């Protein structure tokens, strides 16, 4: 039965007459079940968000794929190739079409928790360079603080923000601050 279900979902993903919402959800279900790899997802998303696709259908695809609740937005936070596809599509949508799809997109992204929305906003704010596919892992430079960040993470350690959470962290863990705590001295 699981194979028949997967076969049906695959059939839905390739049918243009099926609404974008259903095609997007079918792709998401196949991906979550391990039956569709990231390259396949990226290919299908690229087709769904192509300039030839009607904007309302493409917005429905996004809602089906990435909508539905708080945890669903984490996929876009952690897979910046997919986020870059969504961002690229949004920049190509005409002003008139954008007005039509805005309520649908707002509903999709409003379902995400505040942390997910904040992370997505930060990734988008950094711009296309931050969304470009890169090699995994940080690249070390000459100095200890000279690190090129991994996409999805900040450019470096914010010592003031890190130091601000240490008292709470020590209370939660029931630990005693170390005398050589360099973050504590950075305040």
Image: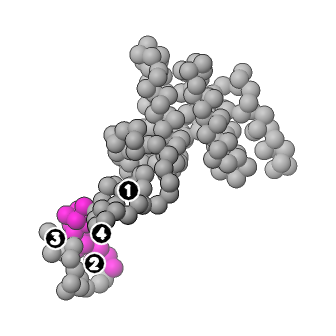
Query: Badge 1, how many Cα within 10 Å: few under 14, some, many 20+?
Result: some
Q: Disc 4 or disc 1, which is closer to the eye?
A: 4
The range drawn in magenta is 158-173
Q: Earlier in the sequence, mark 4 or mark 1?
A: 4
The quarter of the picture where residue 17 lies is top right
Q: Is residue 74 above or below residue 13?
A: below
**Callout 1: SS:** loop
Q: From the image, which quarter does the C terminus lie in?
A: bottom left
Q: Is residue 82 above or below residue 92?
A: below
Q: Earlier in the sequence, mark 3 or mark 1?
A: 1
The circle drawn on residue 144 is: 4
Q: Is residue 163 above or below residue 32?
A: below
Q: Residue furthest front?
A: 142
Label 2 – label 3 distance at C-alpha: 17 Å
Q: Earlier in the sequence, mark 2 or mark 4?
A: 4
Q: Are marks 3 and 1 in contact (CB under 8 Å)?
A: no
Label 4 – label 1 distance at C-alpha: 13 Å
Label 3 – label 1 distance at C-alpha: 22 Å
């Amino acid at each position: 039965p699981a194979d028949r279900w997967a076969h049906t979902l695959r059939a839905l993903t390739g049918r243009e007459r099926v609404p974008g919402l259903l095609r997007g959800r079918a792709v998401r279900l196949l991906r979550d079940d391990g039956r569709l790899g990231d390259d396949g997802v990226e290919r299908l998303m690229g087709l769904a968000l192509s300039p030839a696709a009607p904007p309302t259908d493409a917005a429905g695809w996004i809602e089906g794929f990435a909508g539905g609740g708080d945890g669903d937005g984490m996929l876009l936070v952690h897979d910046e190739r997919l986020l870059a596809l969504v961002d690229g599509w949004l920049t190509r949508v005409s002003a008139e079409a954008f007005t039509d799809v805005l309520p649908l997109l707002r509903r999709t992204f409003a379902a995400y928790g505040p942390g997910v929305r904040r992370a997505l906003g930060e990734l988008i704010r950094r711009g296309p360079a931050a969304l470009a596919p890169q090699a995994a892992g940080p690249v070390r430079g000459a100095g200890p603080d000279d690190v090129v960040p991994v996409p999805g993470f900040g450019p470096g350690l914010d010592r003031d923000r890190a130091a601000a959470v240490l008292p709470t962290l020590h209370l939660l863990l029931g630990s005693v601050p170390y005398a050589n705590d360099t973050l504590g001295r950075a305040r």
